[in-house]
Image: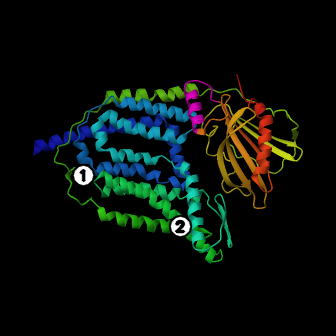
């Protein structure tokens, strides 16, 4: 017994040394990409939607501690094949940094932590600890791209449900009106907060409660679908409570209280139903933390850790070399043609909400009764919060005090010998002012590229030392009744002024 105890103690010390080296490797990775790590924590701090990020690492560590005996029995050895994944993650990080895609930077950082386990301990341990390691990906604040579709679904669901109970509803986009009052589905109504919380809890619940992969996947999918539908019911209940209480209830803090109470009930029901098929009490030795296999005695893979960190350090060094200033650009309003004239009198106070541009131009034109606003935002170099394609570049900010975006679409238009991919937005104020706005992007002499393609192209250009400048154009015109009135004006302006516009920021 004494010899066995000594052997176990020796193996325990070996594991402590190996895990200490892993912890040191993780800390070094974090320091190499410190701005990326800080950006994650900053988002957790300022947004309740992503505050669950604080608990992901403690949960993952607890899961590993829970399975420590099983994991300690896994054979370990350094695996140089992990360096292939590291190179891919570093390229992803560089392209994301160059394109200002913060969420991809953050995924690359967490991916490097996971790859470090593979490199230092090998694929067997990576597979054995797959769930807690990949659970770390939930640390990344992601989901903003779902907000618009979720807002649209919530508006569709709510309007259909309210009409189903016999109430008349007038709708424009995500704004709708009942006889009792006006409503709008904004970002906080999208349900993204409930979905992320449900997914975080649902994945953990599925891992702890089930053994078969099929049941785990089904419950994980349910943890996404159920809160989406439940959010539609939540929004409908709030509208109906407010309507039948003469707009006295569900409008203040109780609006949010009802939401979280409803979410708590839905989650409790989902977990209760999930217990019907539970497998956590099934005798399955392979799934238990305990094991009859003795622990292995890993050797601290110091050489692999040095190689891993040496390769990883190349990306921040390359980033520093690329972070050189670019010359400033001055935008000059194009001279009018075909009877258009410049004017200093805007037709109203609206301007697009674009951020971080290196140069901006706002100019108004008129021809007879036709009025056009020209807005140009030029980005000489893409970087975080200063990029052509940015989710904060909007025709109208959410919850703007006056203007509302009541509908938009993307379409292609050929005019004046040029092809355009246009984003069209219909804007209004409660007082009845209306605007039709067209927006397009101009990159490397082309103006019909998809935003995602632009993002990728400019990021790759930056990473490999090329030019990554780009320009956003917006033209807008007012109308009183039908948007076709403004569309006619914008089409004429684009046909006659478009070739000049597309050259004001072009460089050889």
Q: Does the magenta stretch include residue 91?
A: no
Mark 2, residue position = 234
First along the sequence among labels 2 and 1: 2
191 vs 503: above or below? below
420 vs 269: above or below? above
Tell me the quarter of the picture where residue 207 sits.
bottom left
Q: Distance between the residues labelled 2 and 1?
A: 38 Å
Residue 385 position, x and y percent, is: 62, 40
Q: Residues within 10 Å of mark 2 (few under 14, many from 20)?
A: many
Mark 1, residue position = 287
Residue for point 35% across, 47% down: 132
243 vs 342: above or below? below
Residue for point 33% across, 44% down: 130
In the visual, does 267 lie left or right of 428?
left
Q: How crowded is mark 1: few (under 14 residues within 10 Å), some or many (20 or more)?
A: some
Residue 467 position, x and y percent, is: 63, 26
Residues at marks 2 and 1 touching, judged by CB atoms closer than 8 Å: no
- Nearer to us in this view, 196 or 169: 169
Residue for point 66% across, 50% down: 408
In the visual, does 146 lie left or right of 395?
left
Magenta stretch secondary structure, dominant = helix
Residue 217 position, x and y percent, is: 36, 52
Residue for point 37% across, 28% down: 306
Q: In this picture, which residue range is highlighted in magenta?
A: 452-468
Residue 17, can we see it?
A: no
Disc number lying in front (2 or 1): 2
């Amino acid at each position: 017994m004494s010899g066995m105890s000594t052997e176990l103690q020796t193996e325990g010390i070996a594991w402590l040394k190996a895990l200490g080296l892993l912890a040191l490797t993780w800390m070094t990775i974090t320091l190499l990409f410190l701005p990326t790590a800080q950006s994650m924590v900053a988002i957790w701090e300022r947004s309740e939607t992503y505050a669950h990020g604080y608990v992901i690492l403690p949960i993952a560590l607890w899961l590993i501690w829970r399975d420590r005996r099983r994991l300690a029995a896994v054979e370990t050895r350094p695996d140089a094949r992990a360096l292939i994944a590291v190179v891919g993650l570093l390229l992803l990080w560089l392209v994301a940094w160059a394109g200002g895609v913060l969420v991809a930077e953050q995924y690359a950082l967490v991916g490097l932590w996971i790859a470090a386990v593979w490199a230092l301990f090998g694929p067997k341990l990576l597979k054995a600890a797959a769930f807690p390691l990949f659970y770390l990906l939930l640390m990344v604040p992601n989901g903003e791209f779902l907000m618009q579709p979720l807002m649209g679904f919530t508006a569709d669901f709510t309007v259909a449900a309210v009409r189903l109970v016999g109430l008349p509803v007038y709708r424009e986009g995500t704004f709708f009106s009942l006889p009792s009052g006006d409503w709008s589905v904004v970002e906080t109504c999208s349900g993204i907060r409930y979905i992320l919380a449900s997914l975080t809890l649902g994945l953990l619940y599925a891992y702890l409660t089930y053994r078969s992969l099929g049941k785990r996947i089904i419950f994980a999918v349910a943890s996404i679908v159920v809160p989406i539908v439940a959010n539609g019911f939540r929004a409908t209940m709030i509208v109906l409570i407010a309507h039948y209480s003469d707009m006295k209830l569900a409008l203040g803090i109780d609006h949010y209280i009802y939401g979280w109470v409803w979410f708590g009930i839905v989650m409790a029901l989902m977990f209760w139903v999930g217990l019907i098929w539970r497998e956590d009490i099934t005798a399955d030795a392979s799934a238990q933390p305990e094991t009859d296999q003795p622990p292995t005695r890993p050797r601290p893979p110091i050489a692999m850790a040095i190689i891993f960190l040496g390769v990883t350090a190349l990306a921040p060094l390359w980033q520093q070399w690329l972070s050189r200033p670019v010359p400033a650009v001055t935008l000059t309003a194009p001279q009018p043609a075909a009877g258009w004239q410049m004017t200093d009198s805007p037709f109203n106070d609206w301007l697009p909400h674009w951020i971080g541009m290196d140069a901006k131009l706002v100019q108004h034109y008129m021809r007879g009764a036709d009025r056009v606003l020209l807005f140009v935002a030029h980005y000489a170099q893409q970087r975080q919060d200063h990029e052509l394609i940015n989710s904060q570049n909007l025709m109208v900010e959410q919850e703007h005090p006056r203007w509302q975006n009541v509908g938009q679409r993307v379409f292609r238009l050929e005019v004046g010998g040029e092809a355009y991919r246009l984003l069209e937005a219909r804007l209004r104020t409660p007082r009845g002012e209306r605007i039709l706005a067209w927006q397009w992007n101009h990159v490397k002499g082309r103006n019909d590229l998809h935003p995602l393609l632009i993002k990728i192209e400019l990021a790759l250009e930056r990473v490999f030392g090329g030019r990554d400048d780009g320009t956003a154009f917006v033209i807008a015109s007012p109308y009183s009744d039908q948007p076709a009135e403004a569309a006619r004006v914008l089409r004429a302006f684009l046909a006659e002024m478009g070739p000049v516009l597309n050259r004001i920021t072009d460089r050889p």
